[in-house]
């Protein structure tokens, strides 16, 4: 399993989890995507930087509970501030804002399996930013193809920038929730292919370093090693 | 008289009490923050919603003050009093689950104009999807029938206190 897309150092599994919490249930508008991505990064940063504080050592069995309560409080305050800025988006998103706080993506970045081990702060932030990029691309594609617009949040609501005046009506499916699942599945397949390609390349480079040069044998060995792991 | 030693509480009990105290205090502080944010943002949220609703309904009706809905739907709906010459009506902004995800839908209700509320549009949404929702969504039609029983009867000239009418 080492090096496969299901291994612990692959991004694939956390991205699948986060997609189900963020990309599928939310409306297909880029404005909603911006709001959700900002919230995701706030939660990851909060979980990553609050965890090492000394106060948790005083809390014994309560620290997990209090951390979760703190994350939900952050989401509640974020939702209230969003309501003061753009209530239309807050009404659209509703419970989707709270789904992220409860997702195992956030929990896994906040709590390490081994209590004595430090959280990889930079790794968490990097993973969150990469997923944010993937999420924003998905939202903008769904907005353009499904609604024919690009939307962004403004002080008085949502501003629509009309991109496609006439569209293929079949693409309206991408604006729906089932269309969102299709789009998310497609994105995850592309991600899986990318991760696998990266893994093959890194093995080939590893083989080349150990044998002293890159040749077709080392690439074949990397492919064989990859398929035997699965 | 026997002196009571201050060390009768074991260290583990003391640590547990300390942890419990910190936990309780933290939850109280977080709750206070949420209440504070709610109070600070409530007014602005209502003002922006009023503007958005006015944009949807046009110049025919004038959006006046917010009307409280005394029902569990208060968490996902906001209602406003509407005025037109000597008539009054209610505008309700409600989060409705549609095929395109949750949408903030605006309904107009005036008891003189019919039994059902009228779907006016979706906040900040135009184009094909808006038209598709107007034409075909069963959830939107369902709430158009339900809203009159939720908002109750509006009374002209008195402070509005919406109760829940008998369910249809």
Image (spheres, rainbow, N blue to C red):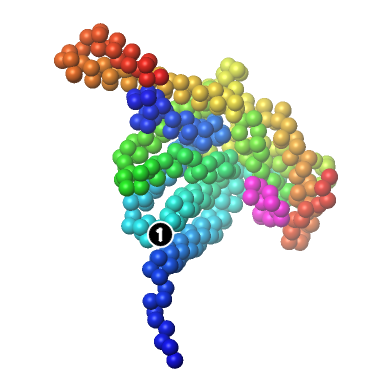
Q: Position of residue B21 (x, y in %)?
A: 45, 66
Q: Is residue B31 above or below residue B55?
A: below
Q: Is residue A219 magenta?
A: no
Q: Is residue B68 magenta?
A: yes
Q: Position of residue A228 (x, y in %)?
A: 37, 16
**Residue tagged by mark 1?**
A59
Q: Which residue, as the protein is rendered here, is positioned at the far left?
A: A212
Nearest the camera: A215 or B46? A215
Nearest the camera: A61 or A146? A61
Nearest the camera: B13 or A163? B13
Quadrant hosting residue A89: top right
A20 relative to A45 in the view: left or right: right
User: Would residue A183 be visible to someone looking at this image?
Assistant: yes
The N terminus of chain B appears in which quarter of the rendering?
A: bottom left
Q: Position of residue A2 (x, y in %)?
A: 34, 25
Q: Position of residue B135 (x, y in %)?
A: 72, 28
Nearest the camera: B2 or A23? B2
Residue at 75% across, 37% down = B142
Q: Which residue, as the protein is rendered here, is positioned at the far bottom?
A: B1
Residue bounds of the magenta highlight: B64-77
Near mark 1 (Cα within 10 A), the count class, few <14, some 14-19 or many ≥20, is many
Q: Secondary structure at mark 1?
A: loop
Q: Is residue B87 above or below residue A214?
A: below
């Amino acid at each position: 399993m080492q090096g496969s897309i299901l291994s612990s150092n692959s991004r694939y599994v956390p991205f699948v989890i986060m997609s189900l919490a963020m990309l599928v249930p939310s409306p297909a508008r880029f404005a909603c995507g911006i709001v959700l991505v900002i919230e995701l990064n706030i939660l990851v940063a909060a979980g990553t930087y609050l965890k090492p504080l000394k106060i948790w050592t005083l809390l014994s069995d309560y620290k997990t509970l209090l951390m979760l309560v703190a994350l939900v409080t952050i989401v509640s305050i974020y939702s209230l501030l969003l309501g003061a800025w753009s209530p239309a988006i807050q009404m659209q998103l509703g419970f989707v804002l709270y789904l992220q706080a409860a997702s195992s993506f956030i929990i896994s970045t906040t709590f390490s399996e081994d209590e004595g081990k430090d959280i990889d702060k930079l790794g968490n932030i990097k993973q969150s930013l990469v997923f944010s990029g993937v999420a924003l691309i998905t939202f903008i594609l769904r907005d353009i193809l499904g609604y024919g617009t690009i939307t962004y949040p403004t002080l008085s609501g949502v501003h629509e920038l009309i991109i496609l005046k006439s569209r293929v009506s079949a693409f309206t499916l991408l604006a729906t929730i089932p269309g969102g699942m299709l789009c998310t599945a497609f994105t995850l397949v592309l991600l899986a292919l990318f991760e696998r390609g990266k893994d093959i390349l890194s093995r080939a480079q590893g083989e080349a370093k150990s044998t002293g040069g890159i040749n077709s044998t080392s690439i074949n060995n990397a492919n064989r090693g990859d398929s035997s792991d699965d | 008289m026997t002196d009571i030693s201050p060390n009768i509480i074991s260290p583990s009990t003391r640590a547990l009490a300390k942890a419990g105290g910190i936990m309780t205090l933290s939850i109280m502080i977080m709750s206070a923050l949420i209440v504070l944010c709610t109070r600070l943002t409530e007014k602005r949220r209502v003002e922006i919603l009023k503007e958005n609703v006015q944009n949807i309904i046009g110049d025919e009706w004038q959006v006046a003050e917010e009307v409280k809905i005394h029902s569990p739907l208060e968490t996902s709906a906001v209602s406003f009093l509407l005025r037109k010459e000597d008539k009054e009506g209610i505008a309700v902004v409600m989060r409705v689950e549609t095929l395109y995800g949750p949408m903030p839908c605006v309904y107009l209700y005036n008891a003189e104009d019919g039994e059902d509320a009228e779907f006016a549009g979706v906040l900040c949404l135009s184009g094909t999807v808006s038209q598709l929702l107007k034409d075909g969504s069963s959830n939107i039609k369902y709430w158009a029938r339900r809203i009159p029983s939720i908002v109750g009867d509006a009374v002209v000239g008195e402070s509005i206190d919406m109760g829940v009418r008998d369910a249809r």
